[in-house]
């Protein structure tokens, strides 16, 4: 296999007495990787490290061939990085165009004509060309999210880090986002941090799952789904000791766990089943 | 059919219009005619160079897309590069609401000086004027203040350069307003300028401290320290040793800022979410 575009080795982060990341090691290749984990698993901490927003306290991060622990390395990474933070923050008195233009200047696009063409291109990509002259404070939450995404796409970055990008998007916007992401992932390394398995199942080629600051799974969506084989049933009752069980629209109980319910019929697992099982009892699938 | 409807733009006139060579009054007359005459429109379409049309369109779109905000337009007019003006346009301390507040505060301080009419008439002005740039700088850069802090950190722009740029802009605007206010103060000229050196020293000190703690905290601490100093030792501030101390403070703080410039390159490693599940 070729060397990874991002290599994370032995990264460890502590906030006071809390261990946010424990000895995290993995590699990323071109394509879309889903960074999956519940709230508080350490996804945002990891993404901020990859985005060079915070120094690497322990361990090593090599992104696009550059060391994130040196100033020169961080600058080289930033020049090829697109980053959508969980809460990007906006100058709300700017219009969408002015805001993306402002970020383009932060990204060293100083030639005015070329910069404005690029701003129009990314706003068009996220479907905001028609509202580019509206002030940010007048845009809906979903539109603001797309303004955030637009700024991340400036300059066709080789590494694209997106923290919960589909939060606040309606189903149609979400579908458009998936289309866009699958195009982007053909030539660059994209990391999609989320706790939504539908987004991961739809567009990700690889999954890195975090739980309590530790990597608990790396592999393909198919492998994660496959780990739930023989652990998902539909029956009239809840399975004993099930990690998750809910009544379906058809009236039966769908259970995910280690033990089958008395009249349970095994069913084909989904990616979400695999993920639920992973969170519920990593020992079951290890 | 009237004679006017029979009239068409002749070829020479249309050719001159197509390359943009007509004086404005004649161009307007052609333009008034074109919407109603298919024949002349076809002629103009044939004669206009597509490359020129594309350039004109790009200029038009740019003019619509990029309406410079009033502050930015002013900066570009005095020679600041367009992209730098836009960066400065995001500085809260350059916004009209902030500048209005600064003017209001200084005007109040000047009025207080007239109302006082004693030896310490300029005391309120001396207390207020130096802290205004400090507040402006504290609100210009950093976590919890700049809404795009995270995006700025992870962009290739040099964070230290941006910090200096915004500090210069804040100082220039605030000091300019304060100079006007100081000129209207009663009393001798030296009193009127007594605030300038502390303003520079306190701003430098705020920057130095913000390489260690959050800028708003640094700003608040510096303001509180200054007010305490004015109340407790105002008479000594205007003496030789007092002024010398301020110069030393300004130079020392500026040196610390320069030596610690790399600290503005990344943010502090802080917890990002309340983390109920993280293991202690």
Image (spheres, coloured by chain):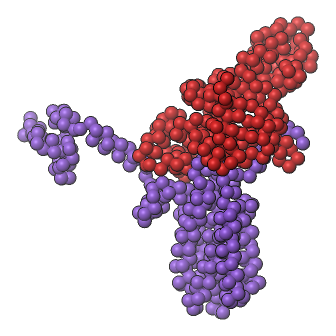
Quarter that holds the C terminus of chain A: top right
Horizontal side, residue B133 vs residue B76: left or right: right
The red one among the chains is A
Residue A125 percent across, percent down from the top left: 51, 33
Horizontal side, residue A277 vs residue A123: left or right: right
Residue A90 percent across, percent down from the top left: 60, 48
- Residue B190 in which image quadrant: bottom right
Report how many numbered discs are placed on residues in the image: 0
Q: Which residue is at the front of the view, B42 or A278?
A: A278
What residue is at 79 percent from the left and 35 percent from the top? A24
- Residue A67 in which image quadrant: top right
Q: Does any portion of residue A38 appear in the rendered image?
A: no
What residue is at 11 percent from the left and 42 percent from the top? B12
The purple one among the chains is B
Q: Is residue B48 above or below residue A186?
A: below
Residue A174 percent across, percent down from the top left: 61, 28
Horizontal side, residue A165 vs residue A22: left or right: left
What residue is at 65 percent from the left and 92 percent from the top? B118
What residue is at 66 percent from the left and 93 percent from the top? B119
Q: Which residue is at the front of the view, A142 or A53?
A: A53
Q: Does any portion of residue B82 appear in the rendered image?
A: yes
Q: Is residue B75 above or below residue A220?
A: below
Q: Is residue B160 above or below residue B35?
A: below
Residue B25 percent across, percent down from the top left: 18, 53
Quarter that holds the N terminus of chain A: top right
- Residue B95 in which image quadrant: bottom right
């Amino acid at each position: 296999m070729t060397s990874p575009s991002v290599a994370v080795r032995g990264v460890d982060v502590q906030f006071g007495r809390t261990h946010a990341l424990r000895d995290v090691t993995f590699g990323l290749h071109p394509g879309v990787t889903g960074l999956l984990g519940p709230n508080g698993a350490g996804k945002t901490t990891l993404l901020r490290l990859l985005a060079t927003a915070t120094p690497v306290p322990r361990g090593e991060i090599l992104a696009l061939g550059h060391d994130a622990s040196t100033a020169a390395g961080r600058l080289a990474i930033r020049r090829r990085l697109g980053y959508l933070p969980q809460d990007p923050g906006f100058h709300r008195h700017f219009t969408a165009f002015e805001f993306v233009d402002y970020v383009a200047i932060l990204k060293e696009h100083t030639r005015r004509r070329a910069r404005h063409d690029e701003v129009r291109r990314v706003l068009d990509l996220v479907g905001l060309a028609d509202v580019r002259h509206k002030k940010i404070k007048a845009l809906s939450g979903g539109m603001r999210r797309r303004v955030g995404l637009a700024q991340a796409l400036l300059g066709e970055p080789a590494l694209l880090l997106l923290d919960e990008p589909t939060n606040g998007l309606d189903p149609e916007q979400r579908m458009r986002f998936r289309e866009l992401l699958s195009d982007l992932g053909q030539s660059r390394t994209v990391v999609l941090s989320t706790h939504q398995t539908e987004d991961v199942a739809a567009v990700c080629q690889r999954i890195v799952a975090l739980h309590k600051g530790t990597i608990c799974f790396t592999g393909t969506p198919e492998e994660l789904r496959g780990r739930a084989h023989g652990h998902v049933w539909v029956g009239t009752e809840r399975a004993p000791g099930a990690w998750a069980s809910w009544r379906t629209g058809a009236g039966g109980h769908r259970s995910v766990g280690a033990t089958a319910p008395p009249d349970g019929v095994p069913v084909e697992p989904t990616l979400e089943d695999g993920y639920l099982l992973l969170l519920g009892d990593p020992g079951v699938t290890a | 059919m009237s004679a006017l409807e029979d009239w068409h733009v002749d070829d020479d006139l249309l050719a001159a219009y197509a390359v943009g060579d007509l004086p404005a009054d004649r161009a307007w007359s052609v333009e008034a005619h074109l919407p109603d005459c298919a024949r002349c429109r076809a002629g103009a379409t044939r004669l206009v160079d597509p490359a020129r049309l594309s350039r004109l369109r790009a200029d038009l779109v740019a003019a619509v897309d990029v309406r410079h905000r009033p502050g930015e337009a002013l900066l570009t007019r005095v020679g600041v590069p367009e992209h730098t003006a836009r960066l400065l346009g995001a500085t809260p301390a350059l916004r009209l609401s902030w500048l209005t507040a600064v003017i209001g505060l200084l005007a109040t301080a000047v009025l207080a000086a007239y109302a006082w009419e004693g030896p310490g008439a300029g005391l309120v002005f001396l207390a207020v004027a130096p802290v205004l740039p400090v507040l402006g700088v504290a609100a210009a850069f950093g976590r919890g203040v700049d809404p795009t802090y995270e995006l700025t950190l992870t962009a290739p722009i040099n964070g230290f350069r941006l910090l200096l740029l915004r500090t210069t802009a804040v100082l220039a605007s605030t000091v300019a307003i304060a100079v006007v206010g100081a000129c209207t103060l009663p009393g001798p000229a030296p009193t009127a300028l007594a605030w300038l050196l502390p303003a520079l020293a306190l701003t430098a000190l705020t920057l130095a401290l913000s390489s260690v703690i959050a800028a708003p905290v640094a700003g608040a601490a510096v303001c509180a320290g200054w007010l305490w100093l004015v109340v407790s030792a105002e008479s000594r501030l205007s003496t030789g040793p007092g002024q010398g101390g301020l110069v030393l403070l300004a130079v020392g703080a500026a040196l610390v800022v320069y030596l610690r410039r790399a600290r503005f390159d990344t943010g502090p490693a802080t917890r990002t979410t309340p983390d109920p599940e993280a293991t202690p």
